[in-house]
Image (tube, coloured by chain):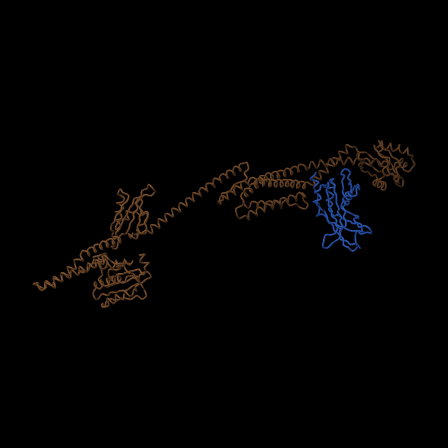
Amino acid sequence: MAVLMMMQASFAEDVSDTLHIQIEEKVIYCSAELSVENSVFKLPMQDGIAVATEWHVKIGKVRQYWLNESIGNITVMRRVEPDLLTHSWLLVGVSSGISQRVYSIDDAIAFLSVLKHFPVLDRSLLLTNVPYRAAVNVNIHVGAINQAWWASLWPTTAASMLKDFTLP
Amino acid sequence: MRLVPLLMASLLLTATVMLWPSTNGGGGLLAWVNVSLMLLMALLLVQYGIRLLRETGEPAPGSRLRAKLVIALVTMLLVPAMVIQMAASQMVDKGMDVWFDVRVDTLLDRALNLAQGFYERVEKDMKRNLLDYISDAALLAAVTGNMDYRTSNVYLTEMSKSEGWQKVEIFDVNERQIGGVQAGELTALQASPLNSTARLAMRLGRVVTELVMHKNGEVAVGYAPLVGPVSVLGLLRVEVRLPAGVIQNARSVEADYRNYRQLERNRQTIRSTFTHVMLFVTLVVVLLAGVVALLFARRLTAPVGELAEALHRITEGDLDVEIAHSPRDELGSLGRSFNTMANRLKQNVEAIEQAQLDLTNALDSSRQRQYVLESLLANLHSGVVLIDSEHRVRLLNQAVRDILQLPKEWVPSADFAELSLGNMHDIGDFYDELRHQEEDYLQREFDMALSEGRTLHVLARGARLSASGTAFSGYLLVIDDISELAEAQKNKAWAEVARRLAHEIKNPLTPIKLSAERLQRRFRKQVDNEQVFDVCTKAIIDQTERLQRLISDFSTLARMPQPKLREVPVNTLLSDMYELFHSYRRISVKIVEDERALCQCDPDQVRQVLINLMDNAVSATNETCAIRVYAVVSDAFAEWHVEDDGDGIDAENATKLFEAYYSTKSDGSGLGLAIAKRIAEDHGGDLKLLSFAGPTHFCLKLPRHVQEKEAT
């Protein structure tokens, strides 16, 4: 099992992703969708294997001749735990601790692959007419998540999304 | 051998390329660690290989042995490790094939279906039972407030007992609990609010079931809407506690199925991970083995390298070498033995060098002695011949060659008996006499007839060299040319005879001559025959005068005065000859070109010699024969030459020409040329007959300066 815990699937070839930034009155939201084949989530979930997606959202100020200045970042992890006996899927927001049981696998897949209207930053932290870049990296964990210290040394990124925006 | 590291590096690089981790392959960090380790090993091998290739001179002592030991030890470990890895991989493959066998797969599917069937059965049963209570009048009355609380609880209790539900609750349309019963003890005082499933069931008017997990087990919860004539009036919620044993088994089946599927999904990854783990272990072991082998080889080869370095230094002549570190093992024993050997070698070399030095000194001394001996022999005027016991010439100097005019065959190692034939038979006879006599020393004087009719008077001395004192035994012959000495002795004897004769004869001659003249004057008139008397007295007087002249020459030869040397122009003597003999037309005198050419000599004596030579030439030739007189002057000598074109001198007479009392003339005393030669020798020069015919050529050669005269 220890060996299995080291496994991290990589699905870079399967994704064609979208990222949108919604700038509202006080909060900056982001909506991202991970376009993966159903088999990526569906097959392991049908086998009763838990699947999780880890979303790293990072907002930075674009600098031309230097690394971008980080303004803020947030990590969201969502996990689906299948229940083969009752044909239900327990949707767990790891960051929030909220869970929900659904009886449709499509709902479970949507829970994993879509980050909808997710608040990421207070608008007051940003300046107008300054270019910013939102970057979203998504890691997909199939099975148990490797909690070992060296797992973070070798992350497997399933998708990366970038979006430049400027406050109006 | 030098390419082995590079070949190993290329093999390692090939393996690295083959095992290069793909983006979606298994292994993860471990795969990259393995690749890094293999690259590191390949780089080390490449570096070592390049160093070997660029190494032109002799490698450091022990380095090759160290490298071979490391390679051998690593190979010895690598080969079984590779075999073990291959076998383990095969075993893993086989094991996984067995593990993920179709029968296991089918068995787990069936087990899961069985578990799922249990849950489905519970749900179906619950739904079917709940459907019977959707339009139950008592429940509708209860939720609409038309039944009192006690009656409704009794009714719910009966429902619970008849259906086997552990908990039954009813809610009105406002989600307010109207009543409820529960088997066993209450778990909570307050009723739990309706969840979204319950609301959904009430809104949709459908019977819905769900599974709720509690700390003490799983509960199947059913929701049934209470439908009135027009609308939904309430909700019935029932709970059935699932049997713990069955649930536990079902969950175990689910967990096993999940694990199995997860393992099956990661089958390739597991194999890859296992391979990388094995490879990592192998690489670590090989690296550790290499390091250990290197340390071991260094420890092992250090004494060998030190020994090789010491041997190299000894080969180059440095004998002050010692192996300092000698461990207590076989190599240490070898080092100590080497130190002993080097010490002995040094002592032997020192002894040899000392012996060589002594030998060199002895050789130098011997060479010096030989050089002295050779110089002595070369400068010795006596001829020396050394003959060994086998009668072979071992040594002969230049003097003996000059004295005896030895032919070319006389060389060292030639047989003396063969050499001493012909003209040399006298020497051979002397050698034979020396060999056969009992005494060790022999001295003889004898005449030897050399080539060209020259006779040599030789004093030969011989000695037998015995082998008692030296390793050499043989004979030493010393030959001296004593011809001149004998001649001088003969001349001296003749001079003594002449002096005595002159003394004894000269005195009576004068009274005889006077008496004869007196007889002639006084008794000429008294004799009968005057003519006869005159003839007789004249004969007495003439012969007496002749005897007086003869006695005078004898006296001159016996009492030759010492020459009174002074600077005399060469041409002056020639001019004197011209004046004396100018009446003879056939005499030509050639003056020397250098009129200032001088010669230190007694002019009277030289003039006497030249007159003698001219007189002999005139008397020995007729009127038609030319006579030439000339002089030749060099830096050291002045030569007067007298040539004539007469009949010449017989070869036999020529050898006796300068002997006293030898004359071809009837009235000659035979002392003229002897006196002339004596004068020439008194001046340090010589008088020679250069050719005895065609032309007859005499040469008077005198040194021009006093030093030459003294040296001569």
The residue lying toward the viewer, choosing from A152 and B242, is A152
Q: Which chain is blue?
A: A
- Left of B589 or right of it: where is A32? right
Question: Where is residue B333 drawn, in percent x and y?
Answer: 52, 37
Pick the front one: B72 or B238: B72
Q: Quadrant of residue B125?
A: top right
From what the image shows, is residue A89 above or below residue A24?
above
x then y, percent, for residue B305: 54, 42
Quadrant in which the C terminus of chain B appears? bottom left
Residue A15 lies left or right of residue B508; in this view the side is right
Instruction: Tell me which corner region of the image, top left, top right, bottom left or bottom right, holds residue B599.
Output: bottom left
Taking the view exactly as shown, the residue that stands out farthest to the left is B528
Q: Where is residue B174? Give x, y as percent.
A: 89, 40
Instruction: Determine if residue B594 is in view.
Output: no
Chain letter, colour brown: B
Q: Quadrant of residue B648?
A: bottom left
Left of B376 or right of it: where is B242? right
